[in-house]
Image (spheres, rainbow, N blue to C red):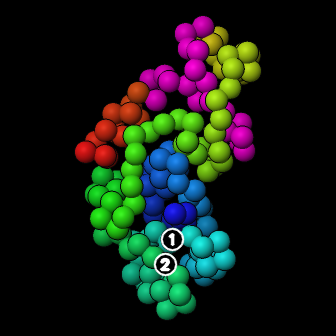
Amino acid sequence: MRFIADMMLGRLARWLRLYGYDTLYGVEEDDEIIRVALEEDRVILTRDCGLAERAEKLGGRVILLGSNDLEEQVGELKRRGVTFRELFPPSARCPKCNGPIRRVSKDYVKGKVPESVYERYDEFYVCKNCGQIYWPGRQWREMLKIDKRLRA
Ligand SMILES: [Zn+2]
């Protein structure tokens, strides 16, 4: 399942990417969202009834979300059949840009991350698209806590 999220759903879009779902975000115009969704067979995620109605009339698939809260939104998606498996970095997509992520060697990140990070960690991932580097630091641990809550 692939998604396109409207502009109100940035946080949800980033989380869907972390869970490995190909999720477009950043398209502003409703017509453009509908066009891309139909062309690329993506499910539209929106909180906007008007957009949902128009998209459905044109044959698009839509999940209309009622809540503004991330945990509740994830609950709504689960009820619509979207599964959330434990976060697993190699299958995640980049939360910043939706690009695929791959594991890289410690050598690869030398000089690209702060020295203290290089010294302390052995596990690194990079986004193939934007080059962002990820490692299991404080932010990562925070994410795992949220992940547990979201899947509970
Ligand atoms: Zn990226």
Q: Earlier in the sequence, mark 2 or mark 1?
A: 1
CA–CA distance in space, label 2 to label 1: 5 Å
The dot on residue 61 is 2
Q: Are marks 2 and 1 in contact (CB under 8 Å)?
A: yes
Q: Residue furthest bottom?
A: 57
Residue 144: x and y, percent? 38, 33
At 47% from the left and 47% from the top, the residue drawn is 19
The dot on residue 70 is none
Taking the image as shown, residue 25 lies to the left or right of residue 51, namely right
Tell me where the magenta segment starts and ends, as one range.
Answer: 119-140
The reply to whether the residue tagged 2 has its Cβ within 8 angstroms of ligand 1 is no
Which kind of residue does numbered mark 2 sit on? Arg
Mark 2, Cα crowd under 10 Å, few <14 / some 14-19 / many 20+, is: some
Which kind of residue does numbered mark 1 sit on? Val
Residue 134 forms part of the magenta stretch: yes
At 45% from the left and 64% from the top, the residue drawn is 8
**The C terminus is located in which quarter?**
top left
Q: Nearer the viewer, residue 27 or 84?
A: 84
Mark 1, Cα crowd under 10 Å, few <14 / some 14-19 / many 20+, is: many
Residue corresponding to mark 1:
43
